[in-house]
């Protein structure tokens, strides 16, 4: 009985230790091509983003316009600002990037007070 108890305690301690030493998520890296969608009305487009340290730059293109994008990383969140040079349309996005850096989910707003959910998935090269 004592041997069984020692064996069970050993497994419990090993399970606790292995849970405490799990690998943390990778640092946020949004460089690459992303397919995004947002509602109000439902739209889709493509981001082409470059990240250097905590700064983000790139473009966003949908059926209506092309935008210049800049932003920054804060913890697992990205903050993006986009503006269309031709139309003056502006958007802001705050999104959380998952631990594998392959999708992000958040919220968008525009200068016209349109807002809603936002989602993007990284495209394979």
Image (spheres, grey):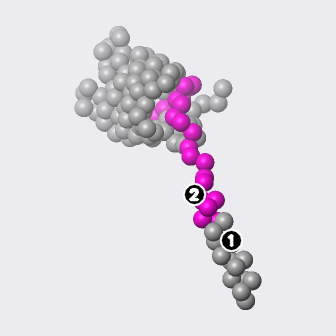
Using the rendered image of the protein, determine whether residue 65 is visible from the camera's viewpoint.
no
Q: Identify the image quadrant of residue 88.
A: top left
Q: Percent from the top left, x then y, of residue 97?
A: 49, 39
Q: Which residue is mark 1?
A: 11
Q: Identify the image quadrant of residue 74.
A: top left
Q: CB of mark 1 within 8 Å of CB of mark 2?
A: no
Q: Percent from the top left, x then y, of residue 116?
A: 34, 39
Tell me the quarter of the image containing the C terminus: top right
Q: Percent from the top left, x then y, of residue 60?
A: 46, 21
Q: Which residue corresponds to the image point at 31% horizontal and 36% vertical from the top-left?
A: 115
Q: Which residue corresponds to the image point at 40% horizontal and 24% vertical from the top-left?
A: 71
State how far apart marks 1 and 2 are (Cα).
14 Å
Q: Which residue corresponds to the image point at 45% horizontal and 23% vertical from the top-left?
A: 56
Q: Is residue 36 left or right of residue 8?
A: left
Q: Which residue is mark 2?
A: 20
> Label 2 neighbourhood size at 10 Å, few (<14), some (14-19), many (20+)?
few
Please provide the residue range marked out in magenta: 15-37
> Label 1 neighbourhood size at 10 Å, few (<14), some (14-19), many (20+)?
few
**In the orientation shown, which residue stands out farthest toward the top?**
86
Q: Secondary structure at mark 2?
A: helix
The correct choice, above or below, for 13 with respect to 6 in the image is above
């Amino acid at each position: 009985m004592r041997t069984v108890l020692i064996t069970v305690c050993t497994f419990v301690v090993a399970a606790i230790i292995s849970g405490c030493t799990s690998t943390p998520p990778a640092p946020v890296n949004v460089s690459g091509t992303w397919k995004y969608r947002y509602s109000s009305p439902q739209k889709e487009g493509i981001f082409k983003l470059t990240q250097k340290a905590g700064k983000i730059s790139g473009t966003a293109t949908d059926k209506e316009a092309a935008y210049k994008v800049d932003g920054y990383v804060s913890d697992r969140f990205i903050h993006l600002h986009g503006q269309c040079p031709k139309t003056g349309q502006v958007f802001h996005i705050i999104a959380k990037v998952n631990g594998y850096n392959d999708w992000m989910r958040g919220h968008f707003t525009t200068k016209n007070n349109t807002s809603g959910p936002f989602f993007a998935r990284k495209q394979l090269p």
